[in-house]
Structure formats: structure tokens, C-alpha cells
Image: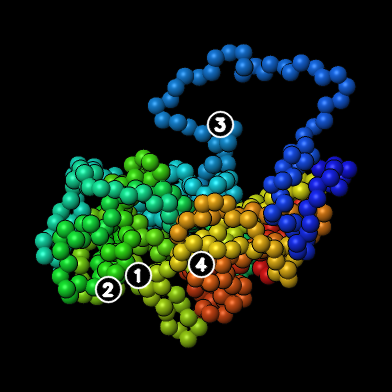
Amino acid sequence: MPNNLLPAINLQPVAAGGLLDRRGFLSVGTALAVAGTTALTGQAAPLEVPSHSRVPGRSFLPYGEPSAFVLPVLKRGLGQPYGDIAPGAGSAFTPLQALHGTITPASLHFERSHSGVPDIDPAQHRLVIHGLVKRPLAFSHEALLRYPMVSRTLFIECSGNSFFQTLPTAQQLPIGMLNGLLSCSEWTGVMLSTLLDEAGIDPRGRWLIAEGADAASMSRSIPLEKAMDDVMVALYQNGEPIRPEQGFPMRLVLPGFEGNMSVKWLRRLKVTEGPVHSKDETSKYTDLLPDGKALQFTYVMGVKSVITRPSPRMTMGAPGFYEISGLAWSGAGRIRRVEVSADGGRSWADAALQEPVLDRSVVRFGLPWRWDGALVTLESRATDELGRVQEPRATWKARYAPGNRYHFNAIQTWHVDAQGEVTNAYA
């Protein structure tokens, strides 16, 4: 950005490192736009007609596709820790660095599978509710489509998200690999309470065991109180039938709870007196403590935020004006505040939250920033409506044993060096 345009933009610093007043940012949009254009000098020449405007374009497609110019960056990162031994066990990470807004396209929603993606004919699939119920029931996919449906915009986050950030050395990976076991969609389906009311809960029932139809029979225990509150049997994602890797023909969606509990390919719900301590909630998804014990059933995801632009593996352009942008979310409710620091947490400035700010959904935040070309340390810190504040990495690490890889929600730090290279760093 030309230096002679800087005095015309009257934004006041609100914290060290070039962070500017968020309230005045929109009022200078014209000046910023002019700063990013190439000036036309002399007599204006007629605008050249490009070749793509001279011939008809391609015809209609039955199913839309991204532009070939952006397709290379719209790809999920893959994690397959067992290689060819178990290629269907692992994760696909949402490329957060390539996305804007808050909704994740269905094709880029993160995926966590324990034994591959089953190919299920919905006409043959049944959801069974049994156990401590008055009337055991079996629902076909077609039958569920006749029930009243609701739509909710909700995030799903694997409790193992950001596990790379628990390692002793900061990993230099794109933010999608560092934090991409998080996605946000509009989910549409039948409230689970409607189906449970139809089955009739025995007074002794306090828990559900939810089981999937994959080869791993992935299963989790769910408190009945949660099941009767806001849990959905989802049939649609972002307006279309949920995709096979997201649980087609049906899955659970548990707002705010760790993603592994939103059981995919849902086939069975058994009402029980207590939790069943399945393999998927004992061998994994527990939090290791320094005294050798482990916390179990830590369901609600913590308050969290992360700066997505700029972020690791990116390189800044010339010094000048930018917008720091990122995502924030909380399993306990709405995000109330996000602060940004450009000096490693010594001073903070409030970011603007883009509307709508929804319950247990992702919100995008932004803050204007004037980078002067010097080394800066960027961080973000979120606060939710319950007053829970994202804590420093050292505080989070002290609470758990060194081997704990779950529920990492600490403040994350990026360095921007004088050449504009952005790297992952530990404060």
C-alpha cells in the first residue's frame, strides 16, 4: 500500500503491534480499496474484452463444481496413522485457511472414521430404540422423513482437534491440519426427544448407548438429560442429504458436545440405567491427568478461538493495512468477546464479531491491522457467555499429563517475521 495514502486513513491504534480501532474500519473501506488498486495514468484506454467473454461458456452441470482456479486449495488434509493396514481409520481435516465466513461446505467438512465409510442403502437401514423403554421401535429412513424437522447451525469439533499443538515442538503445518477437526454446518433433522417420547422412557432410564453401523460399531454413552434436550437425528447437511462420510443416511448431532458423540450411521439407541463404558469412551476420548488418573465424560467443548488469516504457511505481502480474521466457538453457548494481541499477549484489543452470533456455532471475528514490516506475535483469546475465557497454553499444559491429546483449547500463537512469513510458535 503506498505510504502517501496512509495519512488519509484515520484509524487509531488500540494496542501494540499495529492493531487498530475496529469501530472505524468499515468507514474507511473506500480508502482501503483505493489503496489496493492500480492507478490509471494518462488518457483512459477502452477496456479490453477478454477471450472468455467472446465465446459461450460451458453448459449446465447436474451437480455444481468449484472453479478449477480454486480447486487446488479446496482440499482436505488427510491423516491416516495406520497406513495401508487400516486406510479407513484416521481423519480428513477441513482446510480452514481456504475458507471464509462460518459455514463449511459439505465436501470439506472434517471426517473422523475408525473403520472406513460404509455404503448403506437407506431402504434397508433401520434405527432401533430399545432397552428401558415401554415400546421398542424401529424407524426406517422413509418413516423419519415424515416427522417434523428443525434446522440448526452448529459446529462439530473432534475432542482430538489441535492435538498437534500438544506436542513438545510447534509443528509448521497449515492451520487446517492444526485445527481442522472443526466444521460448522446447518443440520436438519428430527429431534431425538420426539422419538424417545414415542418409545416411552422407563423411569429407571438415565442414559443412552448410541451405536453406529460402521465396521467398528462405534458407540458412545449419552446422558438422557442431554438426549431429551437438544439432540437431533440429522438427515440433511447444508440443505442436502448428509454425505456418506458424515453418516448417511442418519447421524446424531449433539450441540456443543465432543464430536465423537455425534454418532454417524446411527443404527441403535439403547436406554440404560448407567453409562456402558464402551471401548470408544475408555481407550480413547479421556483426559490424562498428572496424577495418573484420567477424566472421563468431559463432554462440553471448551471456549476457543484461532486466527486463520494470517496463519502458518502463509506469507504476507508488503507492509500496510490488513484484516486479522479468525474463528471462535464454545460448546457452552454463544461467544461474547474475542480479543487479539500483536505483542504476545502483553496488550489486547477487542475484535468485531460478525453477525449472527449463534448458540454453539462458529463466529468469525476481525480486526484491522497495520503491519509495519517488523516481527510481531499474533494471538486471539475468546470469552463465552458463561464467562469462560480461553487460557494460555502453559496453564492448559499444567492441568494435564504430558501425553494428553484431547480437549486442547488454549491460546495459539503465530509469529510474523520481517519477510512476512507466518509460523506456528509456542508462547
Question: Going by the picture, which residue comes out furthest to the bottom?
Answer: 291
Badge 4 crowding class, 10 Å Cα cut-off, few under 14, some 14 to 19, many 20 or more, is: some
Mark 1–mark 4 CB contact (< 8 Å): no
- Residue 351: x and y in percent read 65, 58
SS under mark 3? loop
Mark 1–mark 2 CB contact (< 8 Å): yes
Q: Which residue is mark 1?
A: 281
Please identify, in this view, whether the residue under mark 3 or under mark 4 is nearer the observer. Answer: 4
Q: Which residue is mark 2?
A: 275
Q: Of the residues under marks 3 and 1, which one precedes in the sequence?
A: 3
Viewer-side residue, 139 vs 9: 9
Please identify, in this view, whether the residue under mark 1 or under mark 2 is nearer the observer. Answer: 2
- Residue 52: x and y in percent read 61, 18
Badge 1 crowding class, 10 Å Cα cut-off, few under 14, some 14 to 19, many 20 or more, is: some
Q: Which residue is mark 4?
A: 385
Q: Which residue is mark 3?
A: 68
Label 3 to label 2: alpha-carbon separation: 49 Å
Badge 2 crowding class, 10 Å Cα cut-off, few under 14, some 14 to 19, many 20 or more, is: some
Label 3 to label 1: alpha-carbon separation: 42 Å
Label 1 to label 4: alpha-carbon separation: 29 Å
Q: What sort of colour scheme is used for the picture?
A: rainbow
Q: Amino acid at mark 3?
A: Ala
The answer to whether residue 10 is visible is yes
SS under mark 2? loop
Mark 3–mark 2 CB contact (< 8 Å): no
User: Relative to 218, does residue 317 appear above or below in the rendering?
Assistant: above
Quadrant of the frame with the N terminus = top right
Q: Amino acid at mark 4?
A: Glu
Q: Of the residues under marks 1 and 2, which one precedes in the sequence?
A: 2
Please identify, in this view, whether the residue under mark 1 or under mark 4 is nearer the observer. Answer: 4
